[in-house]
Image: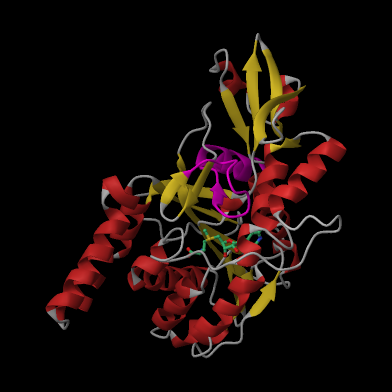
Amino acid sequence: MLAASSGPHGNDTLLARLKHRIKADGPLTIADYMDACLSDPDFGYYTTRDPFGVSGDFTTAPEISQIFGELIGLWAAVVWQQMGSPDDIALVELGPGRGTLMADALRAARTVPEFRNACSVHLVETSPVLRRAQAERLADSGTEPNWHRALRDLPAGPAILIANEFLDALPVRQFVLRQGKWFERCVGLSEQDALEFQTGPEVSGSRTGVSEDVRACAIEGSIVECRPYARRFVEQLAERAPEFPLTALIIDYGHEASAPGETLQAVRAHDFTDVLERPGQADLTAHVDFGDLRETAEHDGLHAHGPLTQRDFLLGLGLKERCEKLIANADATTREYIASGTRRLVDPDQMGQLFKVIALSSSQQPPPPFPGQ
Ligand SMILES: C[S@@+](CC[C@H](N)C(=O)[O-])C[C@H]1O[C@@H](n2cnc3c(N)ncnc32)[C@H](O)[C@@H]1O
């Protein structure tokens, strides 16, 4: 599924392009490697494919159950009411995949027609392939979505933002501790001309962007991660918030508290694979550090609610009741399909515990509906 074009130096695969770059400029930081693998304009993972579903590489919550997007649509309607029911509200999704979450949310939102009429839909998406999938999926939704490349391109005005499995795709930097000093972890070339992890230049602890508390817990050989793109995302929300009220709902896999450890991973065909094998042909992600998100948000003047587990969030919003309602009129096969999808979302050994939810809002906003808070 690679694009047919070749690079500026005759490099017609991402691997060739990366090798050329490393030979010219030296080893890449993990963040630069991740960025190239996911977003290279010709060969990037998301640039070139729709990776979802059984025949793809992974499945996300909205693709598992329609209830996921429906509950988020109703959640957004309540947030809109709490904002004072403004006549115009931007309903924004970041990294909308196939557009399934938004389609389900808009359908559920029809039960609050004033909200539905106030919504303009904005999709922040860089992948041309997925933009086409989103246009198709939303063709019958009664809305004309607006696409943007970045958060900063959104129009002025109040906004409700949804990001499901978006932040895990943003590049991370890694640092390794050797004899009391921190070094950037990089991707370079071995003597056999293969990609390999290498120890890069020394970086002073305070310039790693990793908190002193986390660095203090590290031992010889520990790897720590810093998430500059996720922080920048929160900072951009905070810059907007004083002028335009907003609430952002972030759902992803990750940890509640910051700690040393490596979480960079590659997934292909529903299995973990080597991060350096076949660049651009596997999904590269890192776990979201919800502790750091919360700290960054509060430091920048936003209110943070959560994190909660996905299980507590969805059950608190009425997942079970909606599931029972859908099942009531269904045949046996459909009943099992709906019930197993619901279990996947909330069972602690599936998505229920690993996935967390946090809401960030402008300080003038009342707390959004957040079960158990
Ligand atoms: C794992 S998918 C999640 C899709 C969807 N939210 C879902 O739950 O099915 C990541 C999404 O983020 C998009 N994406 C990745 N990096 C991005 C970036 N830097 N800016 C905008 N979208 C990005 C991808 O193209 C894809 O739509």
Residue 297: image x %, image y %?
Answer: 61, 45
Give the camera-side residue of 45 and 74.
Answer: 45
Q: Which residue is most to the front?
A: 192
Q: Which residue is most to the top?
A: 179
Q: Name the side, left or right, on which 143 lies relative to 271.
A: right
Q: Is residue 288 magenta?
A: yes
Give the camera-side residue of 92 and 95.
Answer: 95
Residue 246: image x %, image y %?
Answer: 60, 63
Residue 102 visible in the snapshot = yes
Task: Indicate the quadrant where residue 66 lies.
Answer: bottom left
Q: Is residue 306 magenta?
A: no
Residue 235 visible in the snapshot = no
* Vertical placement of residue 265 versus 280, above or below: above
Residue 181: image x %, image y %?
Answer: 70, 14
Query: Which residue is located at x 77 percent, y 50 percent?
Result: 17
Label total for image: 0
Residue 303: image x %, image y %?
Answer: 56, 49
Give the camera-side residue of 337 and 267.
Answer: 267
Quadrant of the frame with the N terminus:
bottom right
